[in-house]
Image: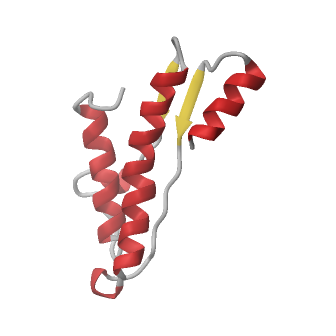
Amino acid sequence: MENMFIKAKKHFKKINAVINNAGVLFHKPLLKTTYKEIDLMLDVNIRGTIIGCKLAKKYMKEGIIINAASVAGLPHHGQKDLATYNTTKFGHITQQNLGLLV
């Protein structure tokens, strides 16, 4: 991911905005979700956003970071058979609300 920021900064000279909008989900009950699928959702949905914000702050002097989440992360909005996805999106929203990312 850092390589992307390096190339963008070199090409455009500066970065004004970053949008973190990646998300992975597997539509199946929790008990049928594999550990590998859980790890992938955590890596992309939470870790990817944190790293994206960290790198954006490193390569931007000023600008805006937009983190797109999902209503699935809001209380009472989680979707059936998406327990891990719902949890990762709740974590994503919570991090933003606590001001831990931007």
Rendered-image quadrant of the C terminus: top left
User: Seen from this angle, which residue lies furthest right?
Assistant: 11
In percent of the image, x 38 and y 50: which residue is there? Answer: 47
Q: Is residue 16 left or right of residue 95?
A: right
Q: Quadrant of the N terminus?
A: top right
Left or right of 27 in this view: 97:
left
Residue plotted at (58% across, 24% down): 17
Residue 70 visible: no
Q: Give the residue drawn at x 53%, y 45%.
A: 21
Task: Judge left or right: residue 51 versus residue 5.
Answer: left
Instruction: Pick whichever, 58 or 84, lies toward us.
Output: 58
Residue lying at 75% horizontally and 21% vertically, measured from the top left: 12
Image coords of residue 67 (percent x, y): 45, 37
Residue 22 in percent (x, y) is at 53, 51
The image quadrant that residue 8 belongs to is top right
Q: Where 35 sits versus 18, above or below?
A: below
Q: Is residue 10 above or below residue 3?
A: above
Instruction: Locate residue 18: give its quadrant.
Output: top right
Q: Is residue 11 left or right of residue 27?
A: right
Residue farthest top in this picture: 62
State whether residue 88 is above or below residue 94: below
